[in-house]
Image (cartoon, rainbow, N blue to C red):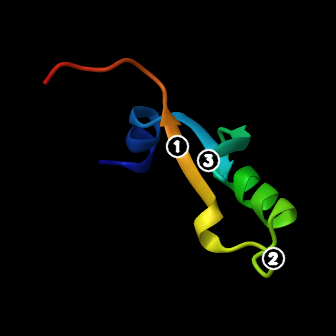
Amino acid sequence: MKQEEATKKFSGEWILLFNDEIVDHSINIEDILKTCEEKFPANKFPDDEIKISKVLDGTLRDF
């Protein structure tokens, strides 16, 4: 599968979670990573409190 096809097939938004609460969201992962570095420096916050996940667009399909 080509990169363009995969990007289109799995389009959606990235979300940044801290203690299971949404802090920020963006379609661009670089924006989320930058926000994460600014708000939650690695030397102050343990890794297990910060999560980045992707919420996919579209509808569910029957298999």
Relative depth, front residue between 54 and 41? 41
- Relative to residue 29, is residue 55 depicted above or below? above
Look at label 1 and name its amino acid. Answer: Lys
Relative depth, front residue between 7 and 34? 34
Judging by the rendered image, the residue that carries numbered circle 2 is: 44
Which SS class for mark 1? strand
Residue 58, image quadrant = top left
Judging by the rendered image, the residue that carries numbered circle 1 is: 54
The x and y percentages for residue 56 are: 47, 33
Which SS class for mark 2? loop
Image point (79%, 82%), residue name: 43
The x and y percentages for residue 29 are: 65, 51
The x and y percentages for residue 3 are: 42, 49
Label 3: how many residues lie within 10 Å, few (<14), some (14-19) or many (20+)? few
Look at label 3 and name its amino acid. Answer: Asp
Which SS class for mark 3? loop
The reply, left or right, for residue 45 in relation to residue 4 is: right
Label 2: how many residues lie within 10 Å, few (<14), some (14-19) or many (20+)? few
The reply, left or right, for residue 56 in relation to residue 40 is: left
Residue 24, image quadrant = top right
Count of marks, rendered view: 3
Image point (54%, 48%), residue name: 53
Relative depth, front residue between 24 and 49? 49
Judging by the rendered image, the residue that carries numbered circle 3 is: 20
C-alpha separation, residue under disc 2 versus residue under disc 3: 18 Å
* Circle nearer the N terminus (1, 2): 2
The quadrant the C terminus occupies is top left
* Circle nearer the N terminus (3, 1): 3
Is mark 2 in CB contact (under 8 Å) with mark 3? no
